[in-house]
């Protein structure tokens, strides 16, 4: 629409072809970064970092669990920005990004829940504890599932995008309230001595591999996001081509 | 308070430029201009699937065009175009469990009409005796008359009527022509999608008219 | 103002006429509460202890009842089109619809809750807090439901999806509401959860009509 002489990157990305060019340029460096960060992070997590004096070797689950929790929130934040992009700026790539991100966010949340359960088994003696953090993550997971369900229920991409964007933003407003209420609920019922996950006192030798794993997760997310966005663009293009083909056939047969 | 904010005396102009709509990925129409002023009645024709209903909903502001602009000229600063419009679509806007009088009272509340005009409006549409029957017992033609009574309950300068003659008998169709003529005389504007003659002076717009 | 009264009057007339009104909601509430003892046994002490939870869960589910038709019926009849063309901002019209829905579900439910509380052997001291918490908290449930209803307005089988979307967002209301009753039953102060409950309702009052109007308007392409 705007014919500025030198469109900003933001505007240029509205064009799927421009997005594809940028995506292709970024993809391989990101894949290499992902592999490198995982190699460094996992080596640190399982080889060089010490076992916890209380939890022993079990503490190593933290390197898988905590970054997944970070990403679960990070992806949701990203989706909220995309939602604003869809509703306010009508950026055509925003809903593609959002649609691509939702299952990834749900995936990270699920990893966080499952590893949390594995971590909890030796700590609490049960596979599931209604701990404040795990419970909040569980609710986040349910919200992700709702967003995915809404995407799948509305077949028109444009209409679906706006509905999902509104749901995402309503969720974003509610998440702090949910987090607060769950924390509040938990302190009300908290037994005297309960182990709390990922407390603030983490030894330095654990922090480096933890952050490395965080970066590895982030890069992995970006790789998967780009791949899913490219797939979504191709799916939409395919639909368009099928319609054009159907039109041509209709004309040539005079139907 | 209940009355429409813009007197019909005020001259309104609709200026739509370069409208294009894709349905799915198919182009319904492209580079479509519509110009209309107070006192104009535009009859919209075109084969099935050429986008008559889509254009109506576009002009009502329910959907956005993929390209082009729709401007209403002659509005005062704080008026919204949506409050000038009547939209009459395939779905009649009547709830079956309510009576015509109750349905119209609701419409009067929402659209800024006057509930005191309901008996008059129903009478004018030849549906006066139906006022207190539940809508579910009415025939399609009777429902259509009740739905059209909304135009008189809440006077608004712009009527968008999508197939208003469907299900109406000959007398009913003539009645719609009369209503349009009165509306035109009082300075109103209307777009009517129908293939049947309206019996009044109209301008024509045919969608998908050029054979592809 | 005319528009808002028209909305409320119409909803109440409809609820009375097609029997989806207060009575049915209360019957559903009663049934939910009646089936609980069959699941957990006739242990009066245990029932009394979990009564606040049962009552609030039942209120949550009873509020969901009929929410899927709140806007869907209007969409099918073409009435949403008229709402969009109204003189009154859509947000306010939707808030009025939520109020009407609450008047025929949340309000009667809150008023009969103490009676059902008796059946569940709830502490006498918790009766009044129960009603107050429901009066303050059920509007939040209706408002969250309004957002769900507008998101699923054009979907054929939106009812199940609506519950999936709405229930996670109802959790804070459930936590604070049930805690008010639990604390009151235990003879402790319940002002804090009550204030927090009111806070949730107020926040929902601000964002829900806005989001619902957006969903209804945007989702029409």
Image (spheres, rainbow, N blue to C red):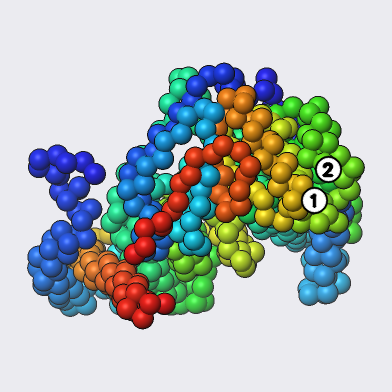
In-front residue for pair B57/B209: B209
Q: Chain of mark 2?
A: B
Q: Which residue is mark 1?
A: B142
Q: Name above or below for residue B27 compared with residue B61.
A: below
Residue at 57%, 44% in the rendered image: B192
Whole-percent x, y for residue A114 in the image: 42, 75
- Mark 2 in CB contact with mark 1 (< 8 angstroms): yes
Q: Decide if residue A220 is on the left or right side of residue B123.
A: left
Earlier sequence position, callout 2 versus callout 1: 2
**SS assignment at label 1:** helix
Residue B134, image x, y percentages: 86, 50
Q: Is residue B207 above or below residue B149?
A: below
Residue occupying image coordinates x 10% and y 40%: A5
Residue of label 2: B127
Q: Residue furthest bottom?
A: A253
Image coords of residue A151 (percent x, y): 45, 64
Question: In the picture shown, does residue C182 fall above or below A112?
Answer: above
Q: Quadrant of the N terminus of chain B?
A: top right
Name above or below for residue B101 compared with residue A34.
above
Give the spatial CA distance, label 2 vs label 1: 7 Å
Numbered tag placed on residue C147 in the rendering: none
């Amino acid at each position: 629409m705007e014919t500025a002489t030198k469109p900003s990157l933001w505007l240029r990305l509205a064009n799927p072809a421009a997005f594809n060019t940028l995506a292709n340029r970024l993809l391989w460096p990101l894949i290499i970064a992902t592999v490198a960060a995982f190699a460094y992070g996992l080596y640190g997590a399982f080889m060089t970092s010490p076992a916890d004096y209380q939890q022993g070797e079990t503490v190593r689950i933290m390197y898988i669990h905590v970054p997944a929790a970070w990403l679960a929130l990070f992806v949701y934040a990203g989706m909220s920005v995309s939602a604003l992009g869809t509703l306010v700026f009508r950026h055509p790539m925003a809903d593609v990004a959002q649609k691509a991100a939702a299952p990834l966010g749900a995936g990270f949340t699920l990893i966080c829940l499952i590893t949390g359960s594995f971590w909890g088994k030796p700590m609490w003696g049960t596979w599931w504890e209604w701990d404040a953090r795990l419970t909040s993550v569980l609710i986040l997971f349910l919200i992700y599932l709702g967003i995915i369900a809404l995407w799948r229920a509305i077949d028109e991409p444009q209409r679906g995008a706006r509905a999902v964007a509104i749901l995402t933003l309503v969720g974003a407003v509610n998440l702090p309230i949910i987090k607060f209420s769950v924390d509040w609920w938990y302190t009300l019922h908290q037994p005297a001595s309960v182990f709390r996950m990922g407390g603030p006192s983490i030894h330095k030798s654990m922090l480096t591999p933890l952050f490395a794993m965080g970066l590895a997760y982030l890069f992995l997310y970006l790789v998967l996001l780009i791949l899913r966005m490219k797939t979504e663009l191709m799916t939409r293009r395919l639909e368009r081509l099928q319609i054009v083909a159907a039109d041509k056939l209709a004309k040539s047969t005079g139907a | 308070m209940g009355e429409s904010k813009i007197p019909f005396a005020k001259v309104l102009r609709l200026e739509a430029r370069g409208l294009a709509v894709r349905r799915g990925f198919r182009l319904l129409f492209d580079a479509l201009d519509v110009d209309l002023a107070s006192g104009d009645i535009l009859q919209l024709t075109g084969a099935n699937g050429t986008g008559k209903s889509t254009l109506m909903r576009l002009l009502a502001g329910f959907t956005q065009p993929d390209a082009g602009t729709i401007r209403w000229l002659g509005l005062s600063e704080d008026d919204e175009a949506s409050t000038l419009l009547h939209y009459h679509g395939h779905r009649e806007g009547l709830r079956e469990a309510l009576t015509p009088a109750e349905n119209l009272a609701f419409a009067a509340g929402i659209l800024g009409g006057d509930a005191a005009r309901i008996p008059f409006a129903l009478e004018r549409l030849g549906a006066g005796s139906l006022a207190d029957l539940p809508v579910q017992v009415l025939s399609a033609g009777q429902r259509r008359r009740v739905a059209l009574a909304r135009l008189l309950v809440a006077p608004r300068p712009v009527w968008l009527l999508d197939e208003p003659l469907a299900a109406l008998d000959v007398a009913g169709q003539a009645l719609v022509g009369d209503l349009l003529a009165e509306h035109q005389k009082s300075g109103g504007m209307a777009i009517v999608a129908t293939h049947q003659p309206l019996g009044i002076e109209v301008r024509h717009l045919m969608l998908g008219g050029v054979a592809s | 103002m005319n528009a808002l009264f028209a909305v409320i009057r119409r909803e109440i007339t409809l609820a009375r006429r097609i029997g989806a009104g207060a009575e049915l909601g209360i019957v559903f509430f009663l049934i939910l509460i009646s089936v609980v003892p069959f699941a957990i046994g006739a242990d009066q002490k245990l029932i009394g202890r979990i009564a606040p939870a049962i009552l609030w869960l039942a209120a949550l589910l009873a509020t969901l009842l009929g929410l899927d038709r709140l806007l869907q019926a209007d969409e099918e009849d073409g009435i949403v089109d008229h709402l969009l063309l109204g003189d009154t901002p859509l947000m306010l019209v939707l808030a009025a619809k939520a109020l009407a829905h609450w008047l025929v579900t949340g309000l009667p439910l809150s008023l009969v809750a103490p009676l059902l509380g008796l059946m569940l052997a709830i502490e006498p001291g918790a009766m009044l807090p129960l009603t107050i918490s429901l009066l303050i908290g059920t509007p939040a449930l209706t408002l969250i439901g309004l957002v769900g209803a507008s998101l699923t307005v054009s979907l054929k089988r939106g009812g199940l999806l609506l519950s999936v979307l709405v229930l996670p967002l109802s959790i804070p209301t459930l936590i604070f509401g049930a805690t008010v009753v639990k604390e009151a039953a235990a003879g402790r102060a319940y002002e804090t959860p009550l204030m927090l409950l009111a806070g949730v309702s107020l926040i929902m009052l601000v964002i829900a009509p806005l989001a619902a109007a957006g969903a209804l308007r945007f989702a029409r392409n």
